[in-house]
């Protein structure tokens, strides 16, 4: 008698790739619900590759960047958190919570436009508790000069002094910087255009980054302005990226030795 296969794609919690598979299915469901573009699946897989060589954990270098990012968000006069399909599919509740703590509205901004995508992402964010969602009405959008992709259509981003761009592509980050805006990036690739151009680059998985930023934001919320400025001034993004690359090198060297030990055992 043939064994009946699991039809609901449930993942055993003792599976060594449980968390990774869990979030893969979130991305897949997001695509089925129109929130995630087909190319978003490829982008997610690429991110997983970088996460492997980071050890799939949040290191102290990333935490330093997160602390600086939270300080920058709290100091900003008009911060915005940009939201794409992958981010909404993976961490909608965390986006909403961070947005409320640091008083930075969420703005939907997409590279791949498809009928119904904005509405699908808006629904996800509303179900997560969001009440202030920008970038949903065509009549309120303006174009960022010098940008050719669909990301050029923005609402409050055009007037923001600080834009947080999790899972961003490099073209808009570069343009935002040229327009004099400060940018916080969350990018698993430490040498992407986004990572290099950003003022603060958090090299970590978004599923770990946002919960950690929420914890940090709750702690820093009570600090004086001068204390937040000190945190920000003590952060060096170039050094932070270089330190991250060193950590990757060290991790790969360690894993090279461990892999062969396991094979021989």
Image (cartoon, rainbow, N blue to C red):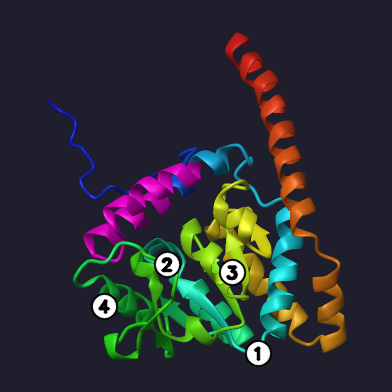
Q: Position of residue 85 (x, y in %)?
A: 36, 65
- Compare marks 2 and 1 and give the one earlier in the sequence: 1
Residue sitting at x 28%, y 85%: 138
- Compare marks 2 and 4 and give the one earlier in the sequence: 4
In this figure, which residue is indicated by the disc labeled 2?
147
Q: Do callouts 3 and 1 mark residues in contact (Cβ within 8 Å)?
A: no
How many numbered marks, from 0 up? 4
Find the distance from the CA under tag 2 to the CA under tag 1. 25 Å
User: Which of 82/222 is in front?
Assistant: 82
Identify whether 228 is placed above or below 27: below
In this figure, which residue is indicated by the disc labeled 4?
119
- Compare marks 2 and 3 and give the one earlier in the sequence: 2
Quadrant including the N terminus: top left
| Element class at badge 1 | loop
User: Which of 56/204 is in front?
Assistant: 204
| Element class at badge 3 | helix
Find the distance from the CA under tag 2 to the CA under tag 4. 24 Å
- Compare marks 1 and 4 and give the one earlier in the sequence: 1
Camera-side mark, 2 or 4: 2
| Element class at badge 2 | loop
In this figure, which residue is indicated by the disc labeled 1?
77
Magenta-colored span: 22-48
Q: Position of residue 149 (x, y in %)?
A: 36, 64
In this figure, which residue is indicated by the disc labeled 3?
178
Camera-side mark, 2 or 1: 2
Find the distance from the CA under tag 1 to the CA under tag 4. 28 Å
């Amino acid at each position: 008698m043939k064994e009946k296969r699991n039809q609901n794609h449930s993942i055993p919690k003792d599976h060594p790739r449980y968390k990774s598979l869990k979030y893969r299915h979130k991305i897949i469901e997001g695509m089925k619900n129109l929130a995630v573009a087909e190319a978003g699946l490829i982008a997610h897989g690429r991110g997983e590759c970088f996460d492997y060589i980071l050890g799939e954990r949040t290191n102290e270098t990333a935490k330093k960047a997160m602390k600086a990012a939270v300080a920058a968000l709290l100091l900003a006069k008009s911060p915005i958190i940009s939201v794409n399909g992958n981010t909404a599919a993976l961490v909608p509740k965390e986006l909403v919570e961070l947005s409320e703590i640091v008083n930075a509205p969420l703005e939907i901004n997409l590279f791949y436009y498809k009928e119904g995508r904005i509405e699908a992402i808006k629904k996800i964010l509303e179900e997560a508790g969001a009440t202030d969602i920008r970038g949903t009405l065509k009549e309120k959008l303006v174009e960022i000069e010098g940008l050719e992709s669909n990301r050029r259509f923005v609402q409050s981003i055009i007037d923001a002094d600080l834009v947080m761009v999790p899972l961003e592509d490099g073209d808009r980050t570069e343009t935002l910087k040229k327009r004099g805006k400060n940018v916080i990036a969350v990018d698993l690739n430490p040498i992407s255009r986004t990572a290099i151009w950003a003022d603060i680059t958090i090299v970590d998985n978004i599923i770990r980054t946002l919960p950690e930023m929420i914890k940090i934001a709750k702690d820093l919320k009570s600090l004086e302005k001068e204390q937040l400025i000190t945190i920000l001034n003590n952060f060096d993004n170039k050094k932070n990226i270089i330190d991250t690359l060193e950590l990757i090198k060290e991790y790969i060297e360690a894993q090279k030795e461990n892999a062969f030990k396991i094979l021989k055992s």
